[in-house]
Amino acid sequence: MNFQTRILVLVFTLLLAGVLVLDGCAGGMSSMSPPNTGSGAARSASGSGRGNNMATFTYTTLDVPGGQNTQPRAISNNGIVVGSFETGSGDFITMHGFIFQKGNFTALDFPNSPLTAASGVNNSGVVVGTYSNVTANPPIESSFMFQNGQFTNIDCAGGNSPNMIEAAGITDSGVVVETLSNSTRSGTTIMLRSPDGSCQQAGIPSDFGQAFAEGINNSLDLSAEVEDSGGFLQNAAIREQGNWTRVDFPLIGGINNRDDVVGDSDISGKQGLLLRKGNKITIAFPGAAFTMAVGLNDKDVIVGNYSTNQTNFPLHGFIATPK
């Protein structure tokens, strides 16, 4: 599962243990001030990604003003970034989704849910993500679509009695990829939801293990992380033209229409990677202790997280733009 989902699962675990209490938040949208250089919301730096190929990127910090642990998840070809951030402190933390467009942040809060995370956006600006009902027993995690200022539940049915349904991405035609799992996060099923609401399985081979979708492109090619029955990461997988293959990525993120993918070099996220035509290109925010590459568009503009702290928190978001 992606890093953003790991944060959600951690929160659920703390909730069930009685360690963490979440403030509720009002539904709808709230606009926030645009980032500015002085506040550290948008700062640029240059660096080189080195691997089997060479690439140079300009890195820009992307932090929601007034928030913490900003986690960009996806970026469209016209530069719309979506993800999540947190507010509050101590035992009272709320997770919000966000949209960043033309220098402005907009918060996304599914009505009556203390946990909202945006995970995908297409070139028309339609956003998908996950929201949570933590008062249910066990907690329920559902998928949403945000379009024209309105939230819609887009859960696919099926799987092994799922109560965790996570949307990971959306195509330009409106096909959404979701992962269905139960409260123990076992028996996963990857589903493709059509614009008419019908759903079909993506058909990953059973011997691949438990697969969690991370991204989708317009050809319905998919990227996914694969875990064993104990929830430990094994490897990653990509579906191209309906065929699944394993790839050497400890952590994998999104996939674009050129079948480039992003991910991380190891489980600790010391540096991100861009896999382009078989070449691995390092993504490393200058001066950071670790960098995680999470999403990308067709121009290989990459979004993700970094931290200057070895303990991994607080998280900062970034945009890496090829020079």
Image (cartoon, rainbow, N blue to C red):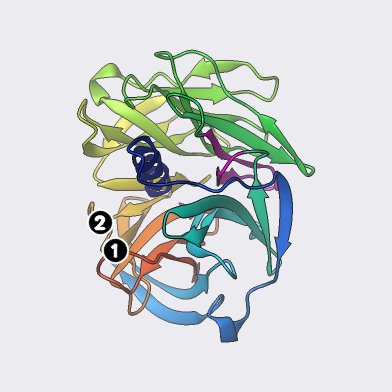
Question: Does residue 45 sit above or below 150 in this rendering?
Answer: below
Residue depicted at 65% across the width and 28% down the height: 153
Q: Indicate the amino acid at tag 2.
A: Ser
Question: Does residue 304 sit above or below 198 in this rendering?
Answer: below
Q: Quadrant of the rendered structure where residue 203 is?
A: top left
CB contact under 8 Å: marks 2 and 1:
yes
Tag 1 residue: 271
Q: Main secondary structure of the magenta part?
A: strand
User: Is residue 294 on the magenta stretch?
Assistant: no
Q: Residues within 10 Å of mark 2 (few under 14, many from 20)?
A: many
Q: Nearer the viewer, residue 70 or 24?
A: 24
Magenta highlight range: 113-133
Q: Position of residue 254 (x, y in %)?
A: 45, 46
Residue 6 in sight in this render: yes
Q: Indicate the amino acid at tag 1.
A: Gln
Q: Quadrant of the rendered structure where residue 128 is?
A: top right
Of all residues, the one furthest to the bottom in this rendering is 38
Q: Position of residue 231 (x, y in %)?
A: 24, 33
Residue 237, numbered circle: none
Is disc 2 placed on a helix, strand or loop? loop
Residue 265, numbered circle: 2
Q: Nearer the viewer, residue 296 or 29?
A: 29
